[in-house]
Image: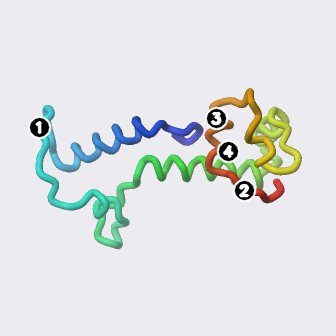
Amino acid sequence: MQSIMVPKGICDSIKEMARQLIWGASEGKQKIALVWWDTICQPRSCGGLGIRCVSDQNKAFMMKLGYNIATKTDTLWVRVLRAKYGINESLSECIMWSRSSFVWKSIVKYNLYREKI
């Protein structure tokens, strides 16, 4: 989840499993939800349980990878990616590269900015 984009269907399945766990559903028998799911996903300081949305968390991980590519040019994995995809100017010029990997496509999907790297 920290290195590739998780498909929406899988995120929805994980969310459904979490809901069943919290509400105490068993063997396909669902129970009545006593609180809105959006309320449960709020921070504890706001009255929620602090559960994070899987898709939002995944997007945050992808943005973190993009930020690291832009700022931590001395680490080995960043140098490898920069060399492989020819990142010299900006990230947006490398997005349409036809033979890019799934990991690269996941990273650039949420890091579409025009600043120089």
**Which residue matches tag 3?**
103
Q: Are marks 1 and 3 in contact (CB under 8 Å)?
A: no
Provide the secondary structure element on which disc 2 rests. Answer: loop
Q: Which amino acid does the dot numbered 2 rest on?
A: Tyr
Label of residue 113 in the image: 2
At 51% across and 46% down in the image, what residue appears? 58
The mark lying in front, picked from 2 and 3, is 2
Are the residues tagged 4 and 2 within 8 Å (C-beta)?
no
Q: CA separation, marks 2 and 1?
A: 46 Å
Identify the residue under disc 4.
108
Where is residue 83 drawn, in percent x and y?
Answer: 85, 36
Figure quadrant of residue 78? top right
How far apart are labels 4 and 1 at the CA level? 41 Å
Mark 2 or mark 4, which is nearer the start of the sequence? 4
**For the residue carrying disc 1, how many other residues have a C-alpha within 10 Å: few (<14), some (14-19), or many (20+)?**
few
Q: Earlier in the sequence, mark 2 or mark 1?
A: 1
- Residue to which mark 1 is pinned: 29
Q: Secondary structure at mark 3?
A: helix
Residue beneath the point at 28% across and 40% down: 17
Crowd band around label 3 with a 10 angstrom C-alpha radius: few (<14), some (14–19), many (20+): few
Question: Disc 1 on helix, strand or loop?
Answer: loop
* Mark sitting on residue 95: none
The answer for how far apart the CA atoms under marks 2 and 3 are is 18 Å
The earlier-in-sequence mark between 3 and 4 is 3
Of labels 4 and 1, earlier in sequence is 1
| Residue for point 36% across, 41% down | 12
- Left or right position of 28 against 58: left
